[in-house]
Amino acid sequence: MRIVSLLPAATDIVAELGLAGQLVGRTHECDWPAEVAGVPVVTSTGVDQDALSSREINSTVHRGSSLYGLDADLLHDLEPDVVLTQDLCDVCAISYRKVTDTVRMMDAGPVVLSLEPSTLDDVLGCLKTVGDVLGVDSAERIAALRQRVADVERQTRDLVRPRVAAIEWLDPCWPAGHWVPEQIEAAGGVPLLAGKGEHTGPITWQAVHDAAPDVVLLMPCGFPPERTLRELPDQPLPETWVLDGPAYFNRPGPRVVRGIEVLAHVLHGIGEEPSANEALKLGPWT
């Protein structure tokens, strides 16, 4: 099976299913596991996240600028059997329409599978969806991931639950929705500013303060922690943590389960202590 992944979360899923060796194409953002580094890159972006501020990146997006390019010639030459993509967010990955338009021009069109999870169950369900298409029994892997979530829920069930505000963009301030509120709940917190499966929009930092969080989680979409640290909000926040958003929270792949485990330690000191690259405490700032 020749697989092209046009979504970092899909690459995570392929790796979880033990099929990373069958990837023949990936996005420029696919950075896990390390072995995919040698897989040909079929996408590109004209937005330099290191050079632009969050506000400038946001302005670029909302001017309608094309964020992602697809190398149609390379995709054709790779002769994939399956192309994994998404139709959830044009800011997060190349659009489903652009992919299907490109595939339509290929002589022997591959199967195009679009993943559109919005809840934790949906995320884990994507393993079955992809596994079924790729001919892999995913039941054991899904059961193991669900057991890890259940273990955290059991350990935190009777603890005092802090109020938690998760922020997935810094300027403008944008609360994390979709599956992140469920991650917070599973880890023993009370999610603020967004509910299960919710597609959020920008808010003011005053709204964050008004929600009275005990803990603030900074997990900007696409920013590793070292990038987030260069652009911390100038706000008097309570206990504040910088998290690895791309690895454990922004991408709807199996590593969201590790995100729950990281949060359990952040909120309650439970489980394996995260590395500094996974979770870094900054506050409180008063």
Image (tube, rainbow, N blue to C red):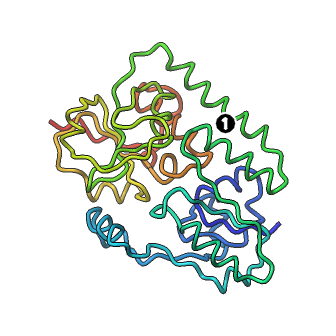
Q: Residue furthest bottom?
A: 73
Residue 66: give x, y in percent of width and height: 43, 75
Residue 115: give x, y in percent of width and height: 63, 54
Which quarter of the figure is the C terminus placed in?
top left
Residue 241, picture quadrant:
top left
Give the camera-side residue of 57 and 32.
57
Q: How many marks?
A: 1
Q: Secondary structure at mark 1?
A: helix
Q: Residue at x 23, y 34 (%)?
A: 238
Against 157, residue 148 (above or below) is below
Against 93, residue 201 (above or below) is above
Q: Is residue 142 left or right of residue 263?
A: right
Q: Residue at x 74, y 79 (%)?
A: 78
According to the picture, the residue beneath numbered tag 1 turns out to be 145
Q: Residue at x 62, y 72 (%)?
A: 99
Q: Residue at x 34, y 49 (%)?
A: 201
Residue 169: give x, y in percent of width and height: 34, 53
Q: Is residue 286 left or right of residue 6?
A: left
Which quarter of the figure is the N terminus placed in?
bottom right
Against 207, residue 73 (above or below) is below
Q: Residue furthest top?
A: 158
Type of residue at label 1? Leu
Residue 82, picture quadrant:
bottom right
Residue 7: give x, y in percent of width and height: 59, 62
Q: Is residue 275 left or right of residue 129?
A: left
Q: Residues within 10 Å of mark 1 (few under 14, many from 20)?
A: some
Give the camera-side residue of 7 and 59.
59
